[in-house]
Image (cartoon, rainbow, N blue to C red):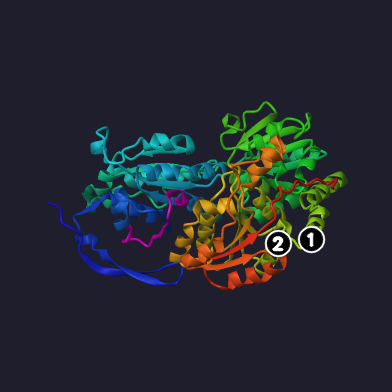
């Protein structure tokens, strides 16, 4: 007969908001057994996990109990997809694996929907799902589903634990796979009977992995590959280096700038579903169409690059690709790619940094091309400001998107450490085109909308001292509006600025272009008072209908110290398309 834990001491922790709390520690030396859930909790703590995004449920309540014995904080949310979105954002901002914990059945399915965005953005996310008991498998157990098979197409690896004694090692494997090669989501289902199974406490070290058991192995470029790449970059007349989402975060910005300065080749990050028409890249499409050599640094030759066909790329443009799986990886199997090198993005960056330390010959034509590329990437058409001025001159009731984004840019100038979270269809593109923050989160190549509030919660947790500004359309804001409640409960003051045009404008614009004004339908929304909704929940709300109200409203939202909503009624216009000829 097993004995229960005896509570003999307490441990004090400090939360992200500065508050402290205590829980009793069960004396390990006098305990004869521990649960599988305790193995999971201690493994996560040993492997460096400090925060989990979760929504409670029957199958995982033993885990909630076990986590009390660790210093791991549970951020408990209102929808399972929000767990994964938060883990995604947290991983991208911190470089740590983001951990989402949900129960089984429908909760698992809800969470899986958000794996699409994490996968496309190369975010190392681990989804832990409760699961029906293995002992009841195939007998119609409560919420029994083929969970691993459901998650499999959306993850790098997906499986169901089969042994309570191996739970710790399963977790280490999940965290390692999520980070190795091209990072991405991993799923592990945890059957409830394994979590509740008792194991001998004096054998606990055999159940726990080593502290470095979840570290991935780096994959770097060989010196010969680096030398060959540098030679081709130096011999090209109009070379460009394009990298994928993994290196787009602020953690790599300075290193990529230094690499660009050393190589005298423009280094351009691509993470938008708009691809070469990404407004935040200015007139990128025009310089890309002139390039005669592209180095794809873990950047797929996919729809975002027109699959390498004209007119996106010149027919004689030479392509060299670096990716973890080489030519066998989806998006890297094009015959347009002349040479493949196998290395992960960070390892390849380190290799190129080392190789670029040698002096490279100065070439006037390279300097001229680099200057042209930089100018194109920073280009802002003067017509934007002219359009805003005309709109104001008409005394229009609604705000022009350019005026709204310019006001937000002024707020960022006052808070240079702030994070931009941009979400939505057409309005989100205006925000990304105009605001140039040090840190930002967008929906990534998947094009999925609606994650803005979960992203903002995670961004504030990643750096509690730095402001977080969300610029989102009204349609996308509605997906996870309830996570305002999460921000309030966890004392996270985020500022949400809604560009409210009372419609699904991206789809409305498609209808206008493709079918004409007489066939636009089923895209209208209400001009809702989201500011009042946020106020009713306990936050701060502002309604703005004129451009001259923006600066003061945003300043009051920041000063409120609460989750705040600045609800701005805007003119419904298409997203910007930038050309140098404009």
Q: Residue furthest front?
A: 518
Local SS, label 1? loop
Residue 96 seen from this side: no
Q: Is residue 128 above or below residue 162?
A: below
Residue 505 relative to residue 55: left or right? right
Give me the residue at 15% from left, 56% from top. 3
In the rendered image, which quarter is residue 106 located in?
A: top left
Q: Which mark is residue 394?
A: 1
Give me the residue at 87% from left, 47% from top. 364
> How far from the left and from the top, in percent, is residue 49?
42, 56
Q: Which residues are magenta?
A: 67-83
Q: Residue furthest left?
A: 1
Residue 199 lies in magenta, yes or no?
Answer: no
Dot 1: within a 10 Å radius of its alpha carbon, few (fewer than 14), some, or many (20 or more) residues? few
Instruction: Provide the residue designation for mark 2.
Output: 397
Q: Is residue 254 above or below residue 107?
A: below
């Amino acid at each position: 007969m097993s004995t229960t834990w005896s509570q003999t001491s307490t441990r004090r922790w400090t939360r992200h908001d500065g508050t402290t709390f205590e829980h009793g520690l069960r004396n390990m030396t006098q305990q004869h057994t521990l649960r599988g859930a305790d193995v999971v909790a201690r493994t996560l703590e040993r492997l460096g996990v400090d925060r989990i995004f979760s929504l409670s449920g029957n199958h995982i309540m033993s885990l909630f109990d076990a986590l009390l014995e660790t210093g791991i904080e549970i951020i408990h949310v209102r929808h399972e997809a929000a767990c994964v979105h938060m883990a995604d954002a947290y991983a991208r901002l911190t470089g740590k694996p983001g951990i989402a914990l949900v129960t089984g059945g429908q909760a698992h399915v809800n969470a899986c929907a958000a794996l699409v965005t994490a996968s496309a953005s190369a975010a190392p996310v681990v989804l832990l799902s409760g699961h029906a008991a293995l002992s009841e498998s195939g007998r119609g157990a409560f919420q029994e589903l083929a969970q691993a098979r459901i998650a499999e197409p959306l993850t790098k690896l997906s499986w169901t634990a089969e042994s309570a004694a191996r739970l710790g090692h399963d977790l280490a494997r999940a965290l390692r796979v999520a980070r190795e090669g091209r990072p991405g989501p991993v799923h592990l289902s945890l059957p409830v009977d394994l979590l509740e199974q008792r194991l001998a406490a004096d054998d606990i070290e055999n159940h726990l992995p080593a502290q470095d058991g979840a570290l991935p192995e780096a994959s770097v470029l060989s010196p010969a590959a680096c030398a060959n790449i540098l030679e081709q970059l130096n011999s090209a007349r109009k070379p460009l280096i394009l990298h994928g989402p993994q290196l787009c975060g602020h953690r790599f910005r300075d290193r990529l700038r230094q690499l660009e300065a050393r190589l005298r080749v423009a280094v351009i990050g691509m993470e938008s579903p708009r691809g070469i028409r990404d407004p935040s890249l200015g007139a990128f499409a025009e310089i890309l169409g002139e390039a005669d050599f592209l180095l794809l640094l873990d950047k797929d030759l996919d729809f975002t690059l027109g699959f390498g066909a004209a007119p996106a790329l010149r027919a004689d443009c030479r392509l060299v690709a670096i990716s973890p799986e080489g030519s066998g990886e989806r998006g890297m199997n094009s015959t347009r790619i002349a040479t493949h090198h196998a290395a992960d993005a960070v390892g390849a960056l380190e290799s190129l940094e080392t190789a670029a330390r040698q002096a490279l010959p100065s070439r006037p034509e390279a300097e001229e091309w680099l200057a042209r590329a930089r100018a194109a990437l920073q280009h802002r058409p003067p017509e934007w400001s002219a359009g805003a001025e005309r709109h104001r001159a008409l005394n229009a009731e609604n705000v022009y998107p350019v005026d709204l984004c310019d006001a937000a840019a002024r707020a960022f100038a006052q808070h240079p450490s702030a994070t931009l979270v941009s979400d939505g269809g057409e309005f989100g593109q205006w925000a990304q085109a105009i605001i140039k923050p040090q840190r930002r989160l967008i929906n990534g190549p998947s094009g999925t909308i609606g994650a803005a509030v979960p992203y903002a919660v995670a961004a504030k947790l990643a750096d509690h001292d730095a402001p977080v500004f969300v610029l989102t359309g009204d349609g996308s804001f509605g997906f996870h509006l309830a996570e305002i409640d999460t921000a309030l409960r966890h004392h996270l003051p985020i500022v949400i600025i809604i560009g409210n045009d009372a419609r699904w404008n991206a789809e409305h614009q498609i209808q206008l272009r493709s079918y004409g004004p007489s066939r636009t339908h089923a895209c209208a929304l209400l001009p809702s008072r989201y500011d009042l909704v946020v106020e009713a929940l306990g936050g701060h709300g502002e309604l703005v209908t004129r451009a001259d109200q923006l600066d003061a409203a945003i300043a009051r939202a920041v000063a409120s110290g609460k989750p705040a909503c600045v609800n701005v009624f805007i003119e419904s216009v298409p997203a910007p398309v930038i050309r140098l000829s404009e």
